[in-house]
Amino acid sequence: MMRYLVSAVAVLLASINTAGAATPDEACAALGEARTHLVAMIGSTDKAAQDDLKSKVHAASAKLDAALAGMSGADADKATQFKPVWEAFKNTRETEIIPAVYAGRNADAKAIATGIQAERMKAMKGAMGCK
């Protein structure tokens, strides 16, 4: 009886520890969502639409940050590889791409997005195993 109880407790604890763990698929989905909204923002010249899309970019980025923080085990190793590139990506997005869009320099924003940011996107997808 005691052995059964110990086994049941072990199973329960294991399920509690992994119940809230984030997955690479969740991270990939949030990354794709952030990218989709940013691409739409780069293509927009309407200030209200840009503001709305910027809000959506930041919401998706927050989802991605939460997913990275919630990864464990082998997935945590993926997150560790992913994070430095993600931080560089976000920095460029916030300091170069978004300001260029708001300044009406959408072509400049697109050039950055299809240059270094595309390389970073490829690296992040590879690190996380995105499809």
Image (tube, rainbow, N blue to C red):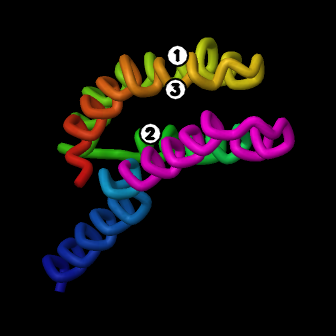
Q: Is residue 115 above or below residue 72?
A: above
Q: Which mark is residue 69?
A: 2
Q: Is residue 114 one of those drawn in magenta?
A: no
Residue stretch in magenta: 28-53
- Disc 2 residue type (three-letter): Ala
- Residue 76's x, y, as percent? 28, 39
Q: Which residue is mark 1?
A: 92
- Residue 127's x, y, as percent? 22, 35
Nearest the viewer among 89 and 68 is 89
Can you tell which of label 2 and label 3 is closer to the viewer?
3
Which image quadrant: the C terminus? Answer: bottom left
SS category of the residue bearing label 1: helix
Residue displayed at 43% across by 60% down:
20
C-alpha gap between disc 2 and disc 3: 30 Å
Q: Which residue is mark 3?
A: 110
- Residue 40's x, y, as percent? 60, 44
Residue displayed at 62% across by 39% down:
43
Please give left or right for residue 123 compared with residue 85 in the image. Answer: left
- Disc 3 residue type (three-letter): Lys
Q: Residues within 10 Å of mark 1 (few under 14, many from 20)?
A: some
Can you tell which of label 1 and label 3 is closer to the viewer?
3
